[in-house]
Amino acid sequence: MDTFDINYNTSKNYWSNTPASLDGMLGGFAKLTIPDIKESNVFLKNLFKMKNGPSNLRALDCGAGIGRISKQLLTKHFTYVDLLEQDKKFVEKAQIILQGTNVVNFYCASLQDFSPNNNIKYDVIWIQWVLGYITNEDLIKFLKKCCMLLNKNGVIVIKENISSSEEGDVDAIDSSVTRSIDSFCNIYQEANLKCITRKTQQNFPKGMYKVETFALQPIIK
């Protein structure tokens, strides 16, 4: 399996110096929000319509930043939403933005250090534009942890940039990697997950990475 030199401290420092704003969350591309949320909304609605699809009681937003996806997508579909983000100032901003909504728990932790409340189960665990900051080994562990948190028919949704290079693309500035499709598929296999549906994001500006959304469920043996 591919290995990448991801330094967690470098990534953490990068984001600690990033403004707690929509533009900050999207690297200066706040305009992507409208087409991003529009297609994610359709993707989620189609998941609910699937045979043995997930329920809409509770969702977990992973790598949530200031709560962009929670506010504009998840709170509109689920009775309860929880938020996971490692940067304290982002969490504090999210608490302000999401005040009065149906977001219940704000967890301040990285994906690799997240210790979930095993008494809470989720119908959808939404993970978007954050997996480039976690190693393959820790990502597999995290996905296995997510599997333990799913309700019956629960789904893990991953929406990420996709590299056209098999080796992936490494960004030294924020210590992140953009993985290839094959790399993601290998990781899913290692985490005992199957892809039940996927979709390529449309209507993003030319010259940007391809963005793929995967819906994953544990393989029952």
Image (spheres, rainbow, N blue to C red):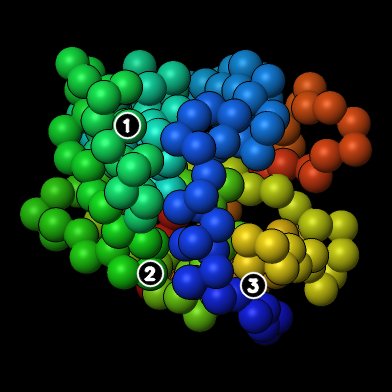
Whether tag 2 and tag 1 are in contact, CB under 8 A, the answer is no
Could one spot residue 191 in this view of the protein? Answer: yes
Secondary structure beneath dot 2 equals: loop
Sooner in the amino-acid sequence: mark 1 or mark 3: 1
Q: Tell me the residue that label 3 is attached to.
A: 186
96 and 203: which one is in front? 96
Circle 2 residues within 10 Å: few <14, some 14–19, many ≥20: some
Which mark's residue is nearer the viewer, 2 or 3?
2
* Residue at 81% across, 73% down: 167
Q: Tell me the residue that label 1 is attached to.
A: 94
Depicted 54 relative to depicted 186: above or below: above
Which three-letter amino acid code belongs to the residue tagged 2? Answer: Gln
Circle 3 residues within 10 Å: few <14, some 14–19, many ≥20: some
31 and 148: which one is in front? 31
Residue 93's image quarter? Answer: top left
Percent coordinates x, y for residue 66 in the rendering: 40, 34
How many angstroms separate mark 1 from mark 3 (CA)?
A: 33 Å
* Residue at 26% across, 52% down: 108
Secondary structure beneath dot 1 equals: helix
* Residue at 43% across, 48% down: 63
How many angstroms separate mark 2 from mark 1 (CA)?
A: 21 Å
Secondary structure beneath dot 3 equals: helix
Depicted 14 relative to depicted 5: above or below: above
Percent coordinates x, y for residue 106 in the rendering: 22, 42
| Residue furthest front in the image | 17
Depicted 85 relative to depicted 167: above or below: above
Whether tag 2 and tag 3 are in contact, CB under 8 A, the answer is no
How many angstroms separate mark 2 from mark 3 (CA)?
A: 19 Å
Marker disc for residue 112: 2
Is residue 167 left or right of 83 when viewed as pictured? right
